[in-house]
Amino acid sequence: MAIDPPSAGESTTDALIQYRTDIADLSQRIKNRRLQVAGLYGTPLTLITLICAGAIAKVYFWLHADAPSAIVSIFGGACVFLLFATVVQLYAEFSADTPWRDSKKSLRSLKLDLELAEERRILEARRLTPPAIERQSSYRERLPGEIARLRVESAHYRRLHLFMQWLLFVGSAAVSGVTAWYDPPQPAKGILIALGSIVTVVTAASGYFKPRERAFNLQQTADSMEQHITALELGIAPYNNSDDGANMESFASTIEGMRAEQRMREQQLDQPQQGQQAVI
């Protein structure tokens, strides 16, 4: 049975997916290489610093006496571990059969490879750009993931808001309870100070970060986007035009307007109160 050759659309999609895969792989390699370099230079420096700190502690605290056996055991174990880690990393970096993928390669060269890969992706995407109707259809297929992300963030801020509110409730009640229980409050002065500090910090954080407003805005945007997706799939207003291209264009324009409005609301929440009033 003969296999049909891939169509132009499939070839374009595969090419763009491959470019994105290469970019993601290079980004991960840069992260791994950054950790490798940090360990390669940081482990021996930590070992030297620990040895110097041990020598200084011996001179200042136990010059004419033996250090406690527990401290000596912890110090020796830490030195042995750091020495072993240093040897292993040096072997992995400079041996012929190194397990590290990018050994002896600088971060600058990897970043240059990433920039070149991104440039190639942009040029190829410009050359292989599909028609507008296909891009709009692809855009619609990506929206469920965006809606799911908005709902997850909304739930996160909602839980954060509830946690802060419960801290305020419990802290305020505890302050009153401890004050009534201890009279005068000298035995519980530390508890009162800690509870008052918690209430003050949580109140200030709740007013500054505004998790309730963020959760509401994210949930509202997700619901609106889902409503427009349903209207487009059912062919009801405002997407009941007989021309599918016009419906897709209107849909993409509306969704982008919602996302821009959501970003503007987030920026307003990040500004001080006077700045928000000036923007509004």
Image: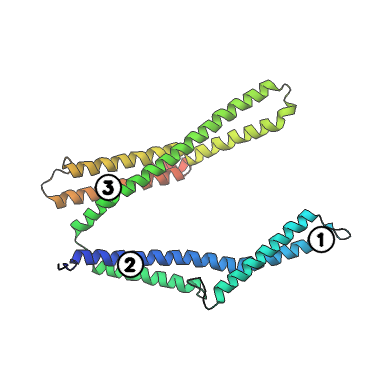
- Secondary-structure class at tag 2: helix
> How far is mark 3 from mark 1, CA to CA?
67 Å
| Outermost residue to the right | 64
Pointer 2 or 1: first along the chain: 2
* Residue plotted at (21% across, 53% down): 137
> How far is mark 3 from mark 2, CA to CA?
27 Å
| Outermost residue to the front | 1
Above or below, 216 relative to 119: above
Give whichever of 246, 236 is nearer the camera.
236
Q: Is residue 272 visible?
A: yes
Q: Residues within 10 Å of mark 2 (few under 14, many from 20)?
A: some
Label 1 sits on residue:
58
Label 3 sits on residue:
255
Q: Are marks 2 and 1 in contact (CB under 8 Å)?
A: no
* Residue plotted at (63% across, 23% down): 177
Label 2 sits on residue:
19
